[in-house]
Image (tube, helix red, strand yellow):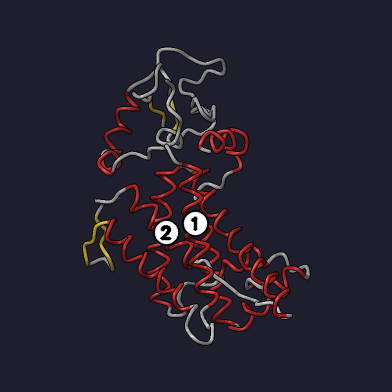
Amino acid sequence: MNRLIDKLERKIGRYAIPNLMNYLIGLYVIGYAVFLINPLFYSQYLSLDPAAILHGQIWRIITFVAIPPSANLIMCALLLYVYYLLGKQLEAILGTFRFNLFIFQGILLHVLGSLIVYGITSVFTGGGWRIGMDTEYLILSMFFLFAFMFQDAQFMLYFAIPIKGKWLAWIDAAYFAYAIVQFFLPGHGYAGMALAALVSLLNVWLFFLETRGTNPGSYQERKRKKEYQQKVHRARPLHYYENGARHKCAVCGRTELDNPNLEFRYCSKCNGNYEYCQDHLFTHTHVK
């Protein structure tokens, strides 16, 4: 599966959206502004409504993302700041293409989950469940990725409480489990929460399957990133490529001429002198 992802990245990787988290934060900010102006506008025209999507309102596939994580301004700003930091860090580790894959795959699973539940309940009950969801659990599921790669990395919870990544993952898991259990309580008032948690966990599982075998590097390696950057800038290859470039990624083929901000390094585990850009240094398949 990892080889398939590598092939897809070579073909369509150029279309991946850099700094995707910035755009998501922008959508949340717009959603909060809409909520302040007209709280009912989101549910009427923007939310994830499977029946409305099937009747042509396909913009809801994207606009449902815009619901803010909290109605409280201070809490919303704090959560968005945490989301931004986590998303930027994951994109730097996974690479732009793989981070795009995780986010867009999660959004698609939310939409498919809502449509599938609506279709099944329409057949068996005569009235489909119009389960609306937001992306809260999709964003929270990023903690699983980060904690998996950096179990001993220390987070400052609420900027005051130090906690290791692996324990943060357990707290996250308990939060997801609580959301799923709510579905079985009388009234089914938490169906959207439970379904969002389930599809977000499915997204994490699928992402691990798709990218298994990659090594994003250890926490210590990431801490020494600045030292590596300095070494890379000092180390210049003696040869030039046909277009005059001195660096070329063995996976995507990009050079410093395509983007002067790209960083390139050689992989010590590959059999030969293979150079990779910052997006593929930790995610490529080693040449043996």
**Relative vertical location of residue 197 with respect to residue 85 in this rendering, above or below:** below
Reading the image, the residue beneath label 2 is 84
Q: Quadrant of the C terminus?
A: top left
Query: As rendered, which of 242 and 176 lies closer to the eye?
Result: 176
Q: Which mark is residue 22?
A: 1
**Number of numbered discs overlaid on the protein picture:** 2
Callout 2–callout 1 Cβ contact below 8 Å: yes
Residue at horizontal 34 percent and vertical 27 percent from the top = 232
Residue at horizontal 54 percent and vertical 81 percent from the top = 36
* Label 1: element kind: helix
Amino acid beneath label 2: Tyr
Cα separation, mark 2 vs mark 1, equals 7 Å
* Number of residues whose C-alpha sits closer than 10 Å to that of mark 2, classed few (under 14), some (14–19) or many (20 or more): some
Give residue 82's position: percent from left, percent from top. Answer: 37, 63
Residue at horizontal 58 percent and vertical 38 percent from the top = 13
Q: Residue furthest front?
A: 124
Between discs 2 and 1, the one toward the N terminus:
1
